Image (cartoon, rainbow, N blue to C red):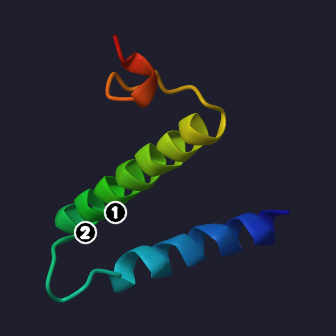
């Protein structure tokens, strides 16, 4: 168990020290892009779910709104 814990710590140090950033963006900019994309994807999934479950309110421009 001690050897496994040591291996995990060393692997974390190696991965952390190599740097996985892209040449064009800083890590904070890259994370901001990823989180923006996740937010957009979540909003699309929520919109799709609302559409499938018919949770959206009816539009006031339907043909059934004739007076």
The percent position of residue 32, horizontal first and vertical second, equals 24, 57
| Residue placed most toward the observer, 55 or 64 | 64
Q: Is residue 57 above or below residue 30?
A: above
Q: Quadrant of residue 28?
A: bottom left
Label 1: few (<14), some or many (≥20) within 10 Å? few
Q: Residue furthest right?
A: 1
The percent position of residue 61, horizontal first and vertical second, equals 32, 28
Q: Residue furthest top?
A: 67
Mark 1, residue position: 34
Mark 2, residue position: 30
Question: Image point 14% across, 85% down: which residue?
Answer: 24
Q: Is residue 29 above or below residue 38?
A: below
Mark 1 and mark 2 in contact (Cβ < 8 Å)? yes
| Residue placed most toward the observer, 15 or 46 | 46
| Badge 2 element | helix
The percent position of residue 35, horizontal first and vertical second, equals 34, 54
């Amino acid at each position: 168990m001690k050897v496994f814990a040591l291996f995990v710590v060393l692997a974390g140090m190696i991965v952390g020290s190599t740097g996985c950033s892209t040449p064009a963006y800083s890590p904070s900019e890259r994370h901001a892009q990823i989180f923006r994309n996740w937010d957009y994807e979540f909003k699309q999934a929520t919109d799709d779910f609302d559409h499938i479950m018919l949770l959206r309110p009816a539009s006031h421009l339907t043909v059934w709104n004739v007076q």
